Image (cartoon, coloured by chain):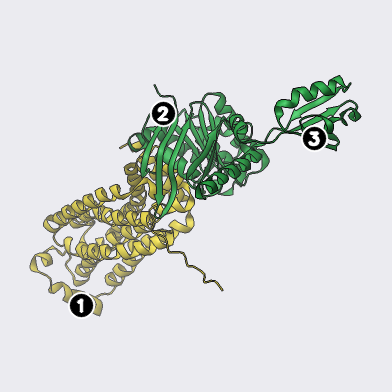
Amino acid sequence: MRDTAISFTRVGRSFGSIDAVQDLDLDIQPGSVAVLLGPNGAGKTTTVRLATGALQADAGTIKILGMDPRIDGNEIRRISGVVPPKAAFYDRLTGLENLQFAAKLWELGPTAPIESAAERFDIGHALDQEVGGYSTGMRTRLALARAILHDPTILLLDEPTAGLDPESARAVLDLIRDMAGKGRTIVMCTHLLHEAEGIADQVVLMNEGHAWVAGHPDHLAEQYWRDNRVHFDAEDRTDLSILSNLDGVVSATFNGHVTAELDNLDRLPDIVATLVAGGARLTRVEPIQPTLEALYFEMQRHRRGEKDEVRS
Amino acid sequence: MNWHRVWAVARTDLRQLAKSRDYWLPLGLLAALFFVVVPIVALNVVASAQSSQVVNQIGTVLETLPLTIQENIQGDTPEARAAFAIAVYLLAPIAVVVPLTIAAAVGSNTIVGERERGTGEFLAHSPITERELYAGKLLAALIPGYGATLIGFGVYSLLVNLIVGPRLGGWFFPTTGWWVLILWVVPPAIAIALSLIVRISARVQSAAAAQQAASLVSLPVIVIAYATASGLVYDPARTGLITGLIAWTIAYVGLASGSRSLRREILLGIGIKRPKRVSVPKR
């Protein structure tokens, strides 16, 4: 029985002398949301193309729901929906004609849910217009409608929010949450870190064709996050003035609330107990959680450090 | 091969073509020029010339032809014989030039157009097979080319019968040679040209480059077809059938190898030769 939806094992693909993907290992569980993070040229788009068999790997093994894209490429593409970075359409045709074309390629028949897919992304009113007159946001919404027309088991989104207005970008993130709720496997490539915040079950940090780091954001935070700062607040802030004198507190800054840096977060219960014993009525005790962006740069810094150590 | 998908691709391309007036209008004018304007002018000049120098010159040319061919030329007067010769023999190559030109213009844009628009990425991720896509693109180029020929042929037949028919005692066109030409020889001739042009379209970087290359490739095909068309209407039973058979064989080989050469990666713009980057010397 398979336990991964998407599996890459030592996959390589080069274009001439450039290694777009090299020794790429990747395991994405069914029903999860994986976010591929990385700068331009990290190999994210190539990874998506390899997954559907649009590109063939030079080396390694790829399995999509147990199928090999080289052998079962058409079946994989039949159950996959892809939103490419550029929402491209036949501009002289209407939105409806473009969706009808997609429905025919996926053999959806006359009952293809074209109108409902368009309505879902608030593009139903423009279906009779030529796509050439659509705005960037409308094109992306149409691309989303096209990608889910056949209710794909695997949804691959490659920089889907690039250049979008906030409303359209939210439509993309809502789609991801909705599809994830239905148990679909989702892969999103992005270099916009805040997009992955709160939706990713797995973050894969890619660079130079490798998957550097992969894991659940919480686990990655545990592994890479070294921030021991805690926000404190109290009904009477003067009760917090003793903070900087307590054992384990490296420093404390007063700026509306108090931010204290501890030498170890394990000391926090003792510090709270001491404050309460001193009569402080605490309204806030909050260790600073890393944003994905901060975590990303921390992971990058960590990996570069490892590389430099290997070199020296 | 899923023919629903093949037809979906062809129909999508044809719909776009139909909505691109700036694209099909010149092609329509070309067909009208060859099938309507040129025949009307040529046939009227001869039909109204009355023993003029033109008729005499045509008569001299006809006398140099083999006796078997001369016997097939209908008409009791020199004007009627000259008009018959022009209608049946001299204008035959237009039946080849028009479809090949239109098919080349449409076909050259097929694959490279998908890449330039970015829709190649969508197709590459779709369940359509390379063979289905190739067949769809081929149909999309063949239908306007051959369609224009059939319509033009119908109009041309009407014109010939109306202008020349009264001098020959009634409607006489199309002759056997023209039927063979239109139904048996022209389709494979288009297919041969398209097998080369669609392959070029998959290999070049831009639609402009594809059109240039397509013109270059289709030119010899047009010249060969032109020469053959002139000859086979003299001897439709043997030359026409044999020519068609050879053309169908070449077309089959060309299409089979062409469909194998279209790879999914090409739709993504991978495997296309790009110009080398010019390095700017440091100051």
| Contact between labelled residues 3 and 1, with CB atoms less than 8 Å apart | no
Q: Is residue B126 left or right of residue A261?
A: left
The residue lying furthest to the bottom in this view is B53
Give the Cα distance between marks 1 and 3: 110 Å
Query: Which of label 1 and label 2 is nearer to you?
Result: 2
Which chain does tag 2 point to?
A: A
What secondary structure is marked by label 3? strand
Which residue is drawn at the image coordinates 51% and 41% (left, top)?
Answer: A212
Q: Position of residue B125 (x, y in %)?
A: 43, 40
| Contact between labelled residues 3 and 2, with CB atoms less than 8 Å apart | no
* Vertical position of residue B76 compared to residue B121: above or below: below
* Residue B96 in which image quadrant: bottom left
Q: Earlier in the sequence, mark 2 or mark 3?
A: 2
Q: Residues within 10 Å of mark 2 (few under 14, many from 20)?
A: some
| Contact between labelled residues 2 and 1, with CB atoms less than 8 Å apart | no
Q: Are marks 2 and 3 on the same chain?
A: yes
Which residue is drawn at the image coordinates 84% and 32% (left, top)?
Answer: A245
Circle 3 residue:
A259
Q: Which of these two is toward me, A150 or B221?
A: A150
Residue type, label 2: Leu
Residue type, label 3: Thr
Q: Position of residue B60 (x, y in %)?
A: 16, 76
